[in-house]
Amino acid sequence: MILSDADIRRRLEAGDLGIEPLADPDIQIQPASVDLRLGAEFLEFQHANIPCIHPNEEAETEEYVEETTVPEGDDYVLHPGDFVLGTTVERVEIPDDLIAHVEGRSSLGRLAVVVHATAGLCDPGYRGQITLELSNLGRAPVALSPGMRVSQLTFTELKSPAERPYGSDRGSKYQDQAGPQASRLGGDREFGGDQ
């Protein structure tokens, strides 16, 4: 079952679903979703610095990722073909009986901006800001303003709560993340990690 605006408000008021700071609930809570705002931090990929990315070499990240913080009042210009990692302003806490789906807003999609390549899911038990995978599929640069509503979360209720929710008991890689986070694929078991 997908949560309606009334369901979302009840869960927020009860405190088992967390979205903070929710600056304007009347605007951000939609009929069946919650709009999230764009943060000011971005991770930009510098493709000229290395011949290729090795997913299992997290140490390489410093060679090809540059962190940028947009000063208050300025925009981040996303050029055609660009791919950057951004973040939400809001920190979320998903209870063990819900799953959250990260979606783009239609108004940005109509400008050819997408907010996730594949990471469109927040597992039960997840806590933290959400890293956005921002791409411009169009032909013109698009100015993104920190603080603008850039994505939305929908919530699906599970038939039963997750027995092993996302989190420290699982060794989850992105629990309690703050700001955009680069890939931690090297922590996967197939690359010698423990996850």
Image: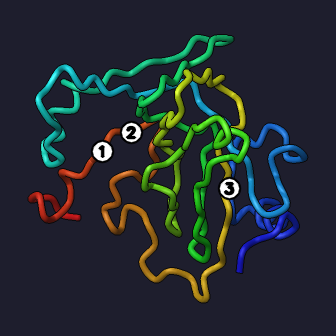
x 38%, y 39%: residue: 181
Of 58 and 138, nearer the camera is 138
Above or below 150: residue 82? above
Of 117 and 140, nearer the camera is 140
Instruction: Name the residue at the bottom extreme.
Output: 159
Inter-mark Cα distance, 3 to 1: 25 Å
- Which of discs 3 and 1 lies nearer the camera? The answer is 1
Residue 45 percent location from the top left of the image: 32, 27
Residue underneath mark 2: 181
> Helix or strand or loop: what does disc 2 sit on?
loop
The answer to whether the residues at label 2 and label 3 have Cβ atoms under 8 Å apart is no
The answer to whether the residues at label 3 and label 1 have Cβ atoms under 8 Å apart is no
* Disc 1 packing (10 Å; few <14; some 14–19; many ≥20): some
Residue 39 percent location from the top left of the image: 59, 30
Residue 172 relative to residue 77: left or right: left
- Which of discs 2 and 3 lies nearer the camera? The answer is 2
x 71%, y 81%: residue: 1
Residue underneath mark 1: 183
Residue 151 percent location from the top left of the image: 65, 45
Sequence-wise first label, 3 or 1? 3
Q: Quadrant of the C terminus?
A: bottom left
x 56%, y 82%: residue: 161
Inter-mark Cα distance, 2 to 3: 21 Å
> Helix or strand or loop: what does disc 1 sit on?
loop
